[in-house]
């Protein structure tokens, strides 16, 4: 108890100095609070002895914090923020982070070109580049662009967030040149490569968003989640399951124990959980937040494994005191706060909460006999304890609380363990046998799909989350004070055990378990049957995919042939869109068409070649490249599909009478963006009497060339050229096409203002659909009739 009291005294002094800003006065107030509360709990002479040591410790902690406030002078490279056309050389010192329309690189600067010569420099820079860049950890780059200081973003202190990572400079979309590779740590490079191989195996075997969810759970790769799913997880309080944080590590360890304790016993399950979090930490990296979270989680698990769960919070307090003694500033790190709060919640609240839930439910004979009651209640108690203890931290830092979090975590916690286990098997199998990984993925997909479905369902409930303001440290202190009182009351209140179940309970449990297992098998069979029977019923389907500011079109013929025309601006966008449209078990694309070389059309196609079985590629002759085209060309070379050059008048038979006809371009690509647009492939998709015209990014000049060549442009559906810009869709061209339906592919609130109001006015006689407003737009036809369905 003395050790615990001293650790608590130190933490109290640190907290008072850190969160009040009142200097020595806060330390004196904290010392007085400690003395008063200690005597209220234990009015004994021994308390005086303990306070004689503890009160100086409170004051020492306040002094330690005040003297350790860091003075952060600008590093060498940040002194060059604002210098135009700066050139510097740097090594990528972390694994790249994928975003929807960009890739983030963290750089360690080595040299800068100053006063007409290269000089040694230092510091860290965050670089944002197009998603088509393919640099990796250890690559040494020469970079030219404009360095800036990180800006503040609304209520989020972005400069402070980056400064805690040692970053005081950012640069967006600079010119980059690779100078060398393999400049980083061999051990770190091996870990990153291994993690990338595992993540790549998941990508190849699971569709989106299930693949991103599995990667998020295994590696903490939250940034790769689709934007909508990320928002839904924030709304339902489940985002901690896919973040590199102490809360995630804590939940992983707790849920592994809960899932396995009923099979092998609590102590053996604890050792398994310890191995799981150590392996997890090795995979996600050695970031300080991960190391701290792993230490805390390991302390809690070890206390259970040694049969000392009731004193686990003692070791946790000592560990936190040591960490804050070494670096008092970590108390401001949200990851540290979440780690400590989540583990403390498990240590002091999960056990009594689980006991009382179990006692309440065992009053029902049927529920008491259910075989999975104990692990289910353990998972629920651990989830609730973690949520309750981290709620104030979430409210203060993110100004949002989730009212759906308790129910959401109850529903997804069992699936979380299942996804973690099954996706680990898929990832490891992919290193040995892709076919085996695909087979195992059939078992991994349902749990991941269930998690996605549950999160999306609960996020759509009105009031699932609420935005709050005005919540500060005082409110958090009041919450934890009330919580401490409630836990103290629970500890003093005697638990009345329910009577043991009758001898017939096993039979009742069996009667409950068998139908439950049968229902699961029936549901799984129904899902597979429905997926297998989800053909087009002799219909042609043309789906204009919502990929943001870009373009991608999926064509599925009545006979089952599948064509993807363009791939949008990024791999994340197109794989997410394909995951919405294609069965998770069928990763076949018969033909990929690249209409032209611009990023918003082919930026995501390299990812398609990596994750799908593509038989052939159709593209025009290219005389001028681009960064996106270079990545696309390398991907084609690596994956090896049949390469077909598009020729005007060429026909592609899709089977059952459906076909694609190449109407353009009139000329090949050249250096300018305008010429690249005008050399876009123009395609006519036809089935029976229905015609669908796909125009790429052609301008009015290219439209006029098609008209002058006497091309039959009649179409029932027109894909409006160049995202509805003012430079396309001439009046004469529309008079020749005469569409009933027009579809515009554009991103929400895009910087170009697409579609242009003038273009929309020209289309007033057609029914207009837009991917930025309607989501995926699917056109279905049986060759005579036409149906349009939207995802929103």
Image (cartoon, rainbow, N blue to C red):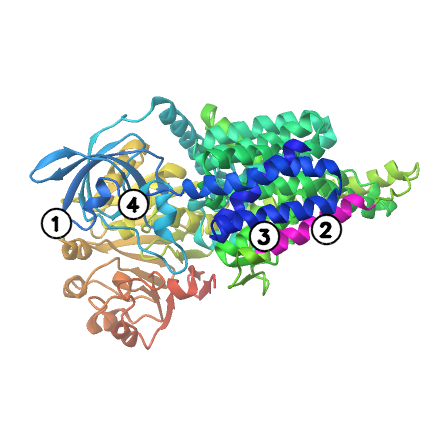
Report the Cα–Cα distance between label 2 and label 1: 71 Å
Residue placed at 75% from the left, 39% from the top? 44
Q: Determine which quarter of the picture holds residue 683.
A: bottom left
Q: Which residue is mark 4?
A: 168
Report the Cα–Cα distance between label 2 and label 4: 44 Å
Pointer 2 or 4: first along the chain: 4
Report the Cα–Cα distance between label 3 and label 4: 30 Å
Pointer 1 or 3: first along the chain: 3
**Label placed on residue 534:** none
Residues marked 2 and 4 touching at CB (< 8 Å):
no
Q: Which residue is mark 2?
A: 486
Give the x, y percent position of residue 513: 78, 40
Residue placed at 46% from the left, 44% from the top? 333
Residue placed at 50% from the left, 46% from the top? 583
What main secondary structure does the magenta stretch of the protein show? Answer: helix
Residue 435 visible in the displayed image: no
Q: Which residues are magenta?
A: 476-493
Q: Residues within 10 Å of mark 4 (few under 14, many from 20)?
A: many
């Amino acid at each position: 108890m003395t050790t615990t009291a001293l650790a608590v005294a130190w933490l109290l002094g640190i907290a008072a100095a850190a969160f009040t800003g009142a200097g020595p006065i806060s330390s004196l107030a904290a010392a007085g609070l400690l003395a008063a509360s200690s005597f209220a709990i234990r009015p004994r002479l021994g308390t005086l002895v303990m306070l004689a040591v503890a009160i100086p410790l409170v004051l020492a902690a306040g002094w330690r914090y005040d003297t350790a406030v860091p003075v952060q002078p600008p590093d060498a490279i940040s002194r060059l923020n604002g210098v135009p056309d700066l050139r510097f050389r740097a090594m990528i010192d972390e694994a790249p982070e994928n975003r929807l329309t960009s890739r983030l690189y963290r750089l360690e600067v080595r040299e800068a070109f100053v006063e007409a010569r290269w000089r040694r420099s230092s510091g860290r820079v965050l670089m944002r580049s197009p998603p088509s860049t393919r640099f990796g950890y250890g690559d040494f780059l020469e970079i030219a662009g404009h360095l800036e200081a990180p800006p503040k973003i609304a209520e989020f202190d972005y400069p402070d967030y980056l400064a805690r990572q040692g970053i005081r400079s950012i640069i967006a979309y600079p010119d980059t040149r690779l100078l060398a590779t393999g400049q980083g740590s061999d051990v770190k490079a091996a870990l990153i490569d291994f993690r990338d191989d595992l993540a790549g195996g998941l990508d190849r075997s699971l569709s989106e968003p299930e693949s991103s969810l599995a990667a998020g759970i295994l590696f903490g790769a939250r940034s790769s989640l689709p934007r909508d799913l990320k928002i839904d997880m924030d709304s339902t309080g489940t985002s901690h399951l896919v973040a590199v944080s102490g809360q995630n590590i804590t939940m992983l360890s707790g849920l592994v124990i809960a899932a396995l304790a009923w099979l092998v016993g609590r102590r053996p399950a604890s050792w398994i959980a310890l191995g799981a979090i150590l392996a997890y930490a090795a995979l996600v990296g050695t970031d300080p937040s991960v190391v701290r979270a792993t230490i805390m989680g390991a302390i809690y698990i070890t206390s259970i494994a040694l049969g000392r769960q009731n004193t686990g919070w003692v070791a946790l307090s000592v560990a936190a005191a040591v960490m804050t003694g070494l670096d008092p500033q970590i108390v401001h790190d949200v990851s540290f706060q979440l780690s400590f709060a989540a583990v403390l919640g498990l240590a002091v609240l999960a056990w009594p909460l689980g006991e009382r839930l179990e006692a309440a439910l065992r009053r029902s004979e049927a529920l008491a006999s259910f075989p999975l009651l104990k692990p289910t209640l353990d998972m629920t108690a651990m989830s609730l304890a973690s949520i309750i203890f981290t709620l104030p931290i979430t409210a203060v830092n993110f100004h949002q609380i989730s009212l759906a979090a308790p129910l959401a975590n109850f529903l997804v916690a069992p699936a979380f363990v299942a996804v973690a286990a099954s996706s680990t098997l898929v990832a490891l199998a992919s290193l040995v046998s892709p076919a085996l990984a695909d087979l195992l993925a059939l078992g991994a997909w349902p749990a991941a799909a269930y998690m996605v479905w549950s999160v999306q369902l609960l996020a759509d409930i009105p009031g699932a989350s609420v935005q709050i303001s005005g919540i500060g440290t005082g409110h958090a202190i009041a919450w934890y004070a009330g919580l401490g009182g409630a836990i103290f009351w629970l500890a003093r209140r005697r638990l009345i055990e329910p009577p043991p179940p009758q001898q017939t309970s096993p039979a009742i449990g069996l009667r409950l378990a068998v139908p439950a297992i049968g229902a699961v098998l029936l549901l799984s069979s129904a899902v597979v049957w429905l997926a297998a029977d989800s053909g087009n019923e002799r219909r042609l389907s043309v789906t204009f995919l919502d990929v943001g500011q870009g373009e991608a079109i999926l064509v599925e013929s009545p006979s089952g042939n599948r064509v993807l025309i363009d791939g949008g601006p990024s791999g994340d966008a197109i794989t997410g869109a394909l995951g919405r449209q294609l069965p998770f078990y069928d990763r076949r694309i018969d033909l990929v068409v690249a209409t032209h070389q611009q990023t918003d059309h082919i930026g995501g196609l390299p990812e398609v070649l990596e994750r799908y079985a593509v038989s052939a590629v159709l593209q025009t002759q290219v005389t001028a490249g681009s960064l996106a085209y270079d990545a696309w060309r390398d991907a084609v070379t690596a994956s090896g599909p049949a390469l077909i050059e598009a020729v005007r008048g060429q026909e592609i038979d899709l089977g059952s009478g459906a076909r694609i006809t190449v109407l353009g371009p009139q000329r090949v690509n050249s250096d300018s963006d305008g010429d690249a647009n005008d050399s876009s492939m123009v395609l006519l998709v036809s089935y029976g009497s229905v015609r669908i015209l796909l125009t790429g990014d052609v301008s009015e000049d290219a439209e006029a060339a098609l008209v002058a060549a006497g091309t039959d442009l009649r179409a029932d559906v027109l894909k409006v050229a160049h995202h509805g810009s003012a430079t396309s869709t001439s009046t004469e061209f529309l008079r020749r096409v005469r569409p009933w339906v027009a579809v515009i592919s554009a991103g929400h609130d895009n910087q170009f203002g697409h579609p242009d109001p003038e273009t929309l006015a020209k289309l007033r006689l057609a029914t207009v659909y837009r991917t930025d407003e309607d989501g995926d737009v699917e056109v279905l036809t049986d060759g005579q009739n036409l149906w349009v369905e939207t995802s929103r």
